[in-house]
Image: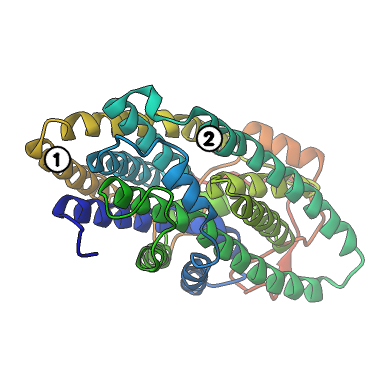
């Protein structure tokens, strides 16, 4: 700690700011379905998620080692490169949060890091094989696997509970949702908190504080876990609304199936060092659970915007990181200008978000009206009567599911 320079200190603080944005950006991954079905009240849900994110940060360092010593070559990389990468990642996180799109904080970080490294030292600074095997392939495969698993699990849960008394099953699935949401939060801590640990460790290596290949120091693990937990507790209500209400209407059975499938995929990936996007995994699981219920549908207009954000995240954050690195290469004034642009950009995005705020009080408003295809599918294969629980009555009563999904006014 005594060898940390002013620039390195600024980079560490910026990394923790990114970790904080990662927390509130990804709260929806664990708690959106639990909140939308009424299994937990919003504030209770985010508090539980925050605690388990912190615990999960201490369970493994495999993902951190992938980032600190795998994505880019450490030799020849300056500390300023890490700062530029974080600026690109933070700005993309904030922009997608403003739009309510559950994009990948992980890919924003990777894109910023790759873009800044290429601007600094050329394409040879990037380990292409690691990017393909541990970033791109999991990015494509993980949401598909989680979605298929959630779809099959949803069908299985409905088949098993078909003859059971509905009030009793609702209570049981409520408990199951809470447990599975906790597991997702724990898994999120083991994967996403480690990304910031890896980036801080990489900064310490480039600054000469640590030797290449070192594990994250204890103080890095504690600070990264705390930052992501605080961000999680703040709650990214815009993205929670999109995940919980904007993609599909979820019953407790579906929420339980989606969260269990997502948690399994994330924990398995963390164990083998795949730095996948927990956002993509959880979104895929939610869509799979929507398709798994008879008559269940996905709002494809929302899903399409989300897919576009997924595709754009790596190149957009990479371009922002490269632009920031172009400035930092100019010297001290360039580093200062980059910091000023980061603060100014964050301020503008925050101001725009206040025009139509999404809070704990309106998070369960429907974000997207049903489209023509959605309504047609629901009319052909209506869901079982009484399968959708009302959140306002805390799962104590149920209402018959309509033959077609009602059209509601759009809420941003």
For the point 47% across and 34% down, which residue is it? 309
Residue assigned mark 2: 130
Report the mark closest to the observer, 1 or 2. Answer: 2
Q: Is residue 164 left or right of residue 216?
A: right
Q: x, y (%) of residue 134?
A: 57, 39
Where does the image place residue 135, in percent across and percent down from the top left? 54, 37
State left or right for residue 241 relative to residue 336.
Answer: right
Q: Give above or below for 184 relative to 297.
A: below
Residue 108, how many percent across, how many down? 41, 40
In the current view of this chain or complex, which residue is farthest to the front?
211
Q: Earlier in the sequence, mark 1 or mark 2?
A: 2
User: In the rendered image of this protein, does residue 278 appear above or below residue 362?
Assistant: above
Identify the image quadrant of the N terminus: bottom left
State whether residue 146 appears in this view: yes
Give me the C-alpha separation between circle 1 and circle 2.
Answer: 29 Å
Report which quarter residue 264 is drawn in. bottom right
- Residue at horizontal 38%, vertical 29%? 125
Residue ID at (80%, 76%): 168
Nearest the camera: 389 or 59?
59
**What is the quadrant of residue 178 in the picture?**
bottom right
- The residue closer to the viewer here, 346 or 357, is 346
Circle 1 Cα neighbour tier, 10 Å, few/some/many (<14 / 14–19 / ≥20): many
Identify the residue position indicated by label 1 in the image: 335
Rendered image: mark on residue 20 = none
Residue 275: percent from left, percent from top? 53, 46
């Amino acid at each position: 700690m005594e060898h940390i320079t002013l620039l390195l200190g600024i980079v560490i603080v910026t990394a923790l700011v990114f970790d904080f944005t990662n927390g509130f950006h990804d709260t929806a991954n664990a708690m959106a379905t639990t909140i939308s079905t009424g299994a937990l009240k919003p504030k209770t849900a985010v508090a539980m998620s925050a605690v388990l994110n912190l615990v999960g940060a201490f369970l493994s360092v495999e993902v951190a080692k992938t980032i600190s010593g795998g994505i880019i070559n450490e030799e020849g990389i300056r500390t300023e490169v890490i700062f530029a990468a974080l600026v690109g990642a933070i700005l993309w996180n904030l922009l997608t949060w403003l739009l309510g799109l559950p994009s990948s904080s992980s890919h924003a970080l990777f894109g910023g890091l790759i873009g800044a490294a290429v601007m600094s030292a050329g394409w040879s600074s990037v380990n292409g094989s690691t990017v393909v095997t541990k970033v791109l392939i999991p990015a494509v495969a993980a949401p598909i696997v989680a979605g298929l698993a959630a779809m099959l699990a949803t069908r299985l849960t409905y088949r098993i509970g078909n003859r059971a008394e509905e009030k009793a099953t609702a209570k049981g699935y409520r408990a199951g949702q809470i447990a599975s949401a906790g597991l997702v939060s724990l898994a999120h801590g083991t994967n996403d908190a480690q990304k910031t640990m890896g980036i801080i460790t990489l900064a310490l290596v480039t600054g000469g504080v640590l030797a290449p290949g070192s594990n994250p120091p204890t103080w890095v693990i504690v600070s990264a876990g705390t930052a992501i937990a605080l961000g999680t507790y703040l709650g990214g209500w815009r993205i929670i609304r999109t995940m919980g209400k904007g993609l599909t209407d979820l019953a407790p059975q579906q929420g339980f199936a989606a969260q269990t499938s997502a948690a399994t995929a994330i924990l398995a990936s963390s164990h083998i060092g795949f730095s996948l996007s927990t956002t993509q995994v959880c979104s895929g699981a939610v869509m799979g659970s929507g398709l798994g219920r008879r008559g269940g549908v996905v709002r494809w207009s929302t899903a399409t915007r989300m897919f576009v954000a997924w595709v754009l995240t790596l190149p957009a954050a990479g371009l922002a990181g490269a632009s920031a690195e172009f400035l930092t290469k100019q010297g001290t004034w360039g580093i200062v200008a980059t910091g000023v642009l980061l603060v100014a950009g964050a301020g503008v995005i925050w101001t725009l978000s206040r025009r139509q705020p999404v809070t704990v009080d309106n998070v369960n408003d429907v974000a997207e009206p049903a489209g023509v295809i959605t309504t047609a599918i629901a009319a052909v294969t209506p869901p079982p009567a009484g399968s959708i629980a009302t959140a306002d009555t805390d799962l104590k009563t149920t209402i018959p599911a309509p033959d077609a999904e009602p059209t509601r006014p759009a809420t941003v």
